Amino acid sequence: MKVSIEEEKLKALWAIESPAIDEHKALEKVLKETQRITAVKDVSSIFVGWVWVIFLGFGASAFSAKRKLELHRQKATSKNENNTNQNNH
């Protein structure tokens, strides 16, 4: 009995006509919206990419400067050790 009530409800819903929709306009609306969303994603991706490039550039410059400073200190330390050794002999 319960199934037949639900069947009747489904039949009643099926009988109701849906409002007339212009499929061309609906499709055009959806395409415009997806085009806008895609454009926003593309622009934001480019922006985020450039931020990463700048961030990585600063990181590489800092690493390079630190490495040069370490090499400079090593050379200065080795020169001081060599001068101390030569003065002791």
Image: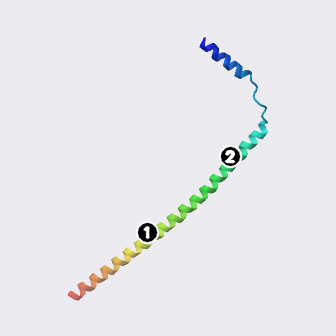
Residue at position x 62%, y 52% from top? 41
Quarter of the image where the N terminus is located: top right
Q: Earlier in the sequence, mark 2 or mark 1?
A: 2
Based on the displayed image, in which of its 4 quarters is residue 72 positioned? bottom left
Q: Which amino acid, by three-letter code, is at mark 2?
A: Thr
Within 10 angstroms of label 2, few (less than 14), some, or many (20 or more) residues? few
Based on the displayed image, in which of its 4 quarters is residue 42 positioned? bottom right
64 horizontally vs 76: left or right: right
What residue does disc 1 label?
63
38 horizontally vs 29: left or right: left
Q: Which amino acid, by three-letter code, is at mark 1?
A: Phe
Instruction: Check if mark 2's residue and mark 1's residue have beta carbons within 8 Å.
Output: no
Residue at position x 31%, y 79% from top? 77
Within 10 angstroms of label 1, few (less than 14), some, or many (20 or more) residues? few
What residue does disc 2 label?
34
60 horizontally vs 25: left or right: left
Q: Nearer the viewer, residue 41 or 56?
A: 41
Residue 89 visible in rendering: no
Residue at position x 67%, y 20% from top? 10
Identify the element where label 2 is drawn.
helix
Front: mark 2 or 1? 2
Quarter of the image where the C terminus is located: bottom left
Based on the displayed image, in which of its 4 quarters is residue 45 positioned? bottom right
Residue at position x 69%, y 48% from top? 35
